[in-house]
Image (spheres, helix red, strand yellow):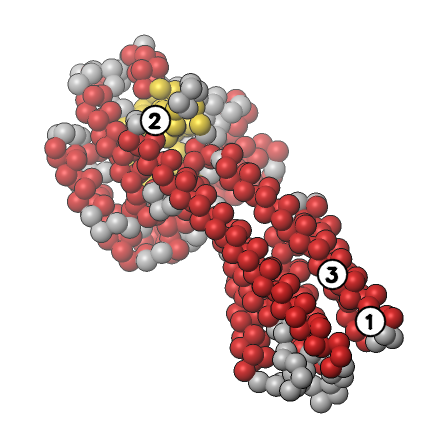
Amino acid sequence: MRQTEDQSQRFWLAYSAASLAVAAMAFGWGVFFAFRQAWALVAVDVAVISVALMSFLLAHRRQLSAALLFSQVSFLLIILVFCLIFDVPNLAAPRVTHLFLLVLALLGYINYQRERSRLQLAVIVSCLLAFVVFASTHAAAPFAQPIADEFRTFGTWVNAIIAVALLCGGIYVMQLKFALNFDQARDIKAALTNREFELFYQPQVDETGRTTGAEALLRRRRPGGGYISPADFIPAAEQAGLMPVIGDWVLNEACRTLAFWQQDEATRHLKLSVNVSVDQFMKADFVDTILARIAARELDATRLKLELTESMMATDVDVIVEKMRALRAAGITISLDDFGTGYSSLSHLRRLPIHEIKIDRSFVQEAPDSKRNRILLKSIFDIARMLEFSVVAEGIETKEQLLLLQSFGCTIFQGYYFGRPVPLAEFQSRSANEAPPLAESA
């Protein structure tokens, strides 16, 4: 994560410096054309300076995505106008302003990797199409005012050199990004090899406060002691495509834990929830792998719970439903995690062979202070009852939240109010001090 922050800081500094450099370059050209009394060109340079300074201010306020899009769209329009009216090629000098369209396209691609959007993609395509048109034709407006040849001969060299330099700078930024991704992927693979990953367990309890199970949460040990938050390595693992590998390790550890619990009367009744990523779930052998591990350890499949996020619904729903049915037929519990924040609809809920929904913590934590959230929360419980789903509420931190959820009929709870995620030994110590349920101990 530190590497990511450093890389983002370097990108922000580079963009801020480039904005000021463009403003300075435009100012220089503006002064030059002012001496030549080419006021139309001075107006273009003033526009460039304005866009560059506005982009710098947005970046300075840490609104980098807004700055990138603003500068790309603005400079695209300025370049189009300049190419059609002023930079008209002739035998004395070729057109070169269109070279900056490649710089804009590259800048757009870098930003698209940071934050994907259709608008950004449209800007990239527009820049490339415009470049092809200007590079292949002598397109010009009927009212064009071509720059005098005495200026163009010199300006052609200057603008071409600047455009190439900016392209080299963009390629360097991309190289840093690729190197960072490679380093992060290598670091995560080394962590798996060195057994730096560990599962923590956060209790899930019923209305009496008795532990009924746990959610397995991934942690990574620091070489010098302490733990690294998942927020610091999960995004890097997702970008590197390593979530299926990490998820496979988590499932294997979860099965080992369940096998251990089955041997103890105090923990035999516990269920274990495991988060499954989209990439992992969509692997062709995902179902067969899980069923093989359950059979190899002779596990009670009903004690394993797979938590799938709503974002999974953005992929092939038919394939997802087929896999869910196979898992459910084996006795595995299917839970829809972070309910209310993703792609689920009533039609999806009707089709999905799930057992429970897990309400996102944002609903739970904001409900006591928001009437609208309370109404939404109650509606979720009403829908769950009609569809015969059980409901797990996570993120409970106060007694007020607990009482409110109980009033809606919630019977399974998770959150800091009942316990933080802890290592396996500490979790089992807590479970050992609880009396096993009568039905299980009889």
Residue at (28, 31) in percent of width and height: 193
Viewer-side residue, 276 vs 104: 104
Q: Is residue 149 above or below residue 418?
A: below
251 with respect to 125 (left or right): left
Image coordinates of residue 53 in percent, x first then y, are 75, 55
Quarter of the image where one finds residue 258: top left
Q: Quadrant of the C terminus?
A: top left
Q: Is residue 289 above or below residue 410?
A: below
* Any part of residue 221 in sight: yes
Image coordinates of residue 73 in percent, x first then y, are 64, 65
416 with respect to 211 (left or right): right
* Any part of residue 77 in sight: no
Q: Circle 3 sits on which residue?
A: 25
Which numbered disc flags the more N-terminal residue, 3 or 2?
A: 3
Q: CA distance from mark 3 to mark 2?
A: 51 Å
Determine whether the residue tagged by mark 2 lies in a helix, strand or loop: loop
Q: CA distance from mark 3 to mark 1?
A: 12 Å
Determine whether the residue tagged by mark 3 lies in a helix, strand or loop: helix
Q: Nearer the viewer, mark 2 or mark 1?
A: 1
Q: Residue furthest bottom?
A: 142
Image coordinates of residue 321 in percent, x first then y, are 28, 52
207 with respect to 257 (left or right): right
Q: Nearer the viewer, mark 3 or mark 2?
A: 3
Q: Rate crowding at label 3 as few (under 14), some (14 to 19) or many (20 or more) other CA atoms within 10 Å.
A: some
Viewer-side residue, 108 vs 420: 108
What label sits on residue 33 in the rendered view?
Answer: 1
Viewer-side residue, 394 vs 194: 194
Image coordinates of residue 408 in percent, x first then y, are 47, 34
Residue at (53, 51) in percent of width and height: 173
Q: Amino acid at mark 1?
A: Phe
